[in-house]
Amino acid sequence: MTMSKQSLLVRDERTTRRNAAEVRFRTYGLCAIGIAAMALVVLLTTVVSSGVGAFRQTYIMLEIALPEAKLDVMGTRDPAVMAKVTTFGYAPMLRDALLNKLAEQEITTSLSDKDVAGMISKEAVATVRNHVLANPDLVGGTVTLDVLAEGRIDGYFKGRVTMQSAGLDRNTSPEALQIAQSLADAGVIETRFNWHFLTAPDASDQRPEAAGLGVAILGSLYMMLVVLVLALPIGVAASIYLEEFAPKNRLSDLIEVNISNLAAVPSIVFGILGLAIFINFAGLRQSSPLVGGLVLTLMTLPTIIISTRAALKSVPPSIRDAALGVGASKMQSVFHHVLPLAAPGILTGTIIGLAQALGETAPLLLIGMVAFVREYPAPYSETAGLFGEAATALPVQVFNWTQRADPGFAERASGAIITLLVFLAVMNIAAVLLRRRFERRW
Amino acid sequence: MKDTNVIEGIQTMTQQKISAKNVQVRYGDVVAIKDVSVDIAANTVTAFIGPSGCGKSTFLRCLNRMNDTIDICRVTGDIHIDDEDIYDRNVDPVQLRAKVGMVFQKPNPFPKSIFDNVAYGPKIHGLARNQSDMADIVENALRKAALWNEVKDRLDSPGTGLSGGQQQRLCIARAIATAPEILLMDEPCSALDPIATAQIEELIDDLRQNYCVVIVTHSMQQAARISQKTAFFHLGSLVEYGDTGQIFTAPSDPRTESYITGRIG
C-alpha cells in the first residue's frame, strides 16, 4: 500500500463516514427531544383545554323573597329555631325567584315550573339557607344572591353542552338552554372566575358545579407540613451520620443498599405498611392527614437521604481537611463548613421529595383518604388530635372525580390536575430559586 | 547552599521538638511507612524529600493525627511532641491540631470572607475575648503570613477570590492564627507559579523564628533553599536524615545520591 499525498481540501472516506455518523446522532437527539416536547405540548393542551372550564363558573343572579311565614313562623329570628326549615323549604323560593326573572324579561317557555327550577343547582338551596341562617334579619325581605346554575347550563356556557347533546340528555333540554341564553343576554346569568373551585369542599354526584378543592388542598397542605417536619430533620440527620460519621463496614453497606432499594419500592407498599402500623397497630385515625403525612414521610425519606448524601459527597474533601487542620472537631467541620455548602443540594432534594409526595395517590387510597369529605379539617381538635380530622388530598380528589358519571366532574378533575401541576411548578421553581440564592454566597 | 551551612551552627543549639520512634503506618494490609525514627528540632525548617508515594506526606500527617480521619489507616510506634505521646489515649486530636497547624498541597480556603477564614480557628478554640481581640489576632496572623498589605482593605471579600499564591498565604495565616508551635506543610508550593513560590519560601524562612516548620516538597532545590534539616524517604523508609548541606553535598547513602542527582524518583 502506498501512501499517496492527501490534500487537506479533500475529505477522505473515513472522515466522511465519521461526519455522517455524527450528523445521524445529532438527528436522533433532535428527534428524541422533539417527540418529548410534542408529548408535553399534547398533554398540557389536553389537560388545560378540558380543565380550564373548572376555573369559570356560571351564576344566576336572583332576587329571592324570604317570607317570614315560611322561614320564621315564631318571629324569633333565632338561627337555632330557623334551622328547623330544611333546604326543601327553600326550594320554592328559588323557583319563584327564577320564574319572576323570566316574567320580568318577558321570556315565555313551554317548560314546566319544575324544569325551570331545575336550571338552578341543587346546591343553591343550601347556599341560600346558610346565608339566611347567618343573617336572620334578612327574613321578611328580599335578598339578591348569585346562585350556582345547574351543571348542564354551566356546561352550555363553557361549550361542553350543545343544543344537540342537550336534546339527548334527560337532565336538561334545548329549551332550557335557550332560556339560559336569553337570561345571559339580559345579564341575569353570568360566567365568571370561580374562586369556589379552590375553596369549596367536594360535592355529591349530582352537583359537579358545586364541587371544589378546598378540603383536598387543605389535606395536602397538612400532609406536606407533616412530611416536611418529619422527613427533613430525620433524613438530613440520617444522611449526615451515614456519610460523615458512620464507620464503613458491612452494616453500613447493608443500610445503604436498603435505602437505595426503599427508594424504588412501589408507593402502594408504603400504604399497606401505613395501614398495618399507623392505623391498625398504633390506632391513629384513618383518613387523617397525620397518617397520610406519616406514610408519605416514609416514602420521601429515601429520596431525601439519597440526595442529601449526594450533596454531602460533592463537598470537596479539602474543606473538611482545612477545618480539621485548624483543630475543628468532626462535628464542627460538618456543621460549620460541609453542611452550609451542601445546603442547596439538600434543599433541592427535599423539595423534589415533597413534590413527589404531593402527587402521590396510591398509598393514600389504602389509608382511607379517598373518603368523601365535606367538612374542612381543623389542624387540631380535641377529639381527633393534631391533623387528625378526615381529609382528602389533591391527587386522590382527581382520582375520585374521574370515577364519577357526570361529565361536569371530568372537567373538575382536569381543573384539579391543573391546580396540582401549578403547585408542583411552584415548588420546583422555589427549589431552583433557593438553590440559586444559596449558591450565590460564593 | 552556603547560607544553610551558616545557619547550621545556630541550629545545633536548639532543642528537639518532635521525636518519632519506630513509626509504622499501614493502610489496611499495605505498609506505607516502615520503622521511621526521626528527631525534629524547634525553630528549624525540616524538609521531607523523596519520590512520589514514598510516604513523606503520610508521615507528615501522622504528626497532627490527620491520618485518624482515614478509616483503614493504622499508626504504630511512638511520636512525642515536647515529650508527650500524641497517640496517647488521653490526647484529643482537636487540641493537638491547634498546636500543630497544617497547610495543604492545594490552597483550600473556606468559602467565607478573608477575615472569617483566619478567625475561624481562634473562634472555635476560644482564643479571642472580644471583637477587637479577634481583629488583632487576624491582623497579626495576616501580617505574619505577609498577606496583610494586600488584603487589609478587603477583609470582607471571599477568600476564594484571591490568587493561588494569596490563597496559600491565607491558609498559612489561618494555620498560624491558632498560635501553633509546629507548622506542617504538605507541598505548599506545588500548585503555585514561581513568583508565588518565592514569596511562600521567603515566608517560610521568616516563620522559622517562631515555629518549628516541617515541609514536604518535591523540589530538591526548594528543600536546599529553605531547610536546615532534610530527610530523604524512599519506599516507605527513612533513608537518610541530616543537615541539609550535608545531604545535598555529601550524602552517605547511595540511594540519596541517586535521587538528588536525578537517577531515581
Image (spheres, coloured by chain):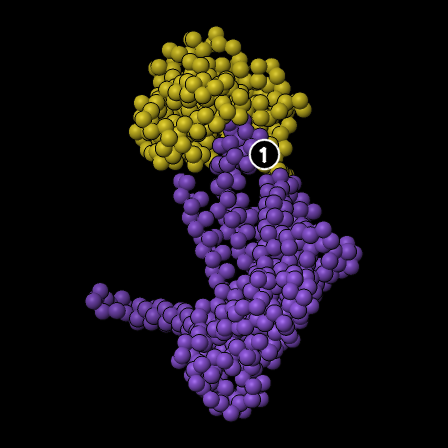
Chain colours: A purple, B yellow
Element carrying mark 1: helix
Q: What is the total number of numbered labels drawn onto the structure image?
A: 1
Q: Residue at x 20, y 67 (%)?
A: A9
Q: Nearer the viewer, residue B199 or A165?
A: A165
Foreground: A31 or A219?
A219
Residue depicted at x 71% and y 59%: A274
Q: Is residue A343 left or right of residue B7?
A: right
Q: Quadrant of residue B134?
A: top left
On what subunit does the disc labeled 1 rest? A
Query: Visible in this render: residue A74?
Result: yes
Q: Is residue A58 left or right of residue A204?
A: left
Residue B192: percent from left, percent from top: 36, 33
Q: Amino acid at mark 1?
A: Met
- Residue A214 location in percent, x, y? 57, 63
Give the position of the N terminus of chain A as an image quadrant. bottom left
* Residue B136 to residue A123: above or below: above
Q: Is residue A344 above or below residue A145?
A: above
Which residue position is annotated with label 1?
Answer: A331
Q: What residue sits 68% from the left and 57% below the top?
A: A389
In the depicted view, which residue is nearer to us: B142 or A51? A51
Quadrant location, the C terminus of chain A: top left
Query: Looking at the picture, does residue A113 appear above or below residue B37?
Result: below
Residue A263 is situated, as x and y percent measured from the top left of the image, at 62, 58
The extreme right residue here reads A281
Task: State the residue at coordinates (54%, 23%).
Answer: B125
Task: Please tell me in which quadrant of the rendered image residue B195 appears.
Answer: top left
The answer to whether A16 is drawn above or below residue B140 in the figure is below
Is B64 left, or right, of A27 in this rendering?
A: right
- The local crowd at label 1, few if under 14, some if 14 to 19, many if 20 or more residues have their Cα within 10 Å, is some
- Residue B36 visible somewhere in the drawing: no
Q: Position of residue A319 (x, y in %)?
A: 48, 36
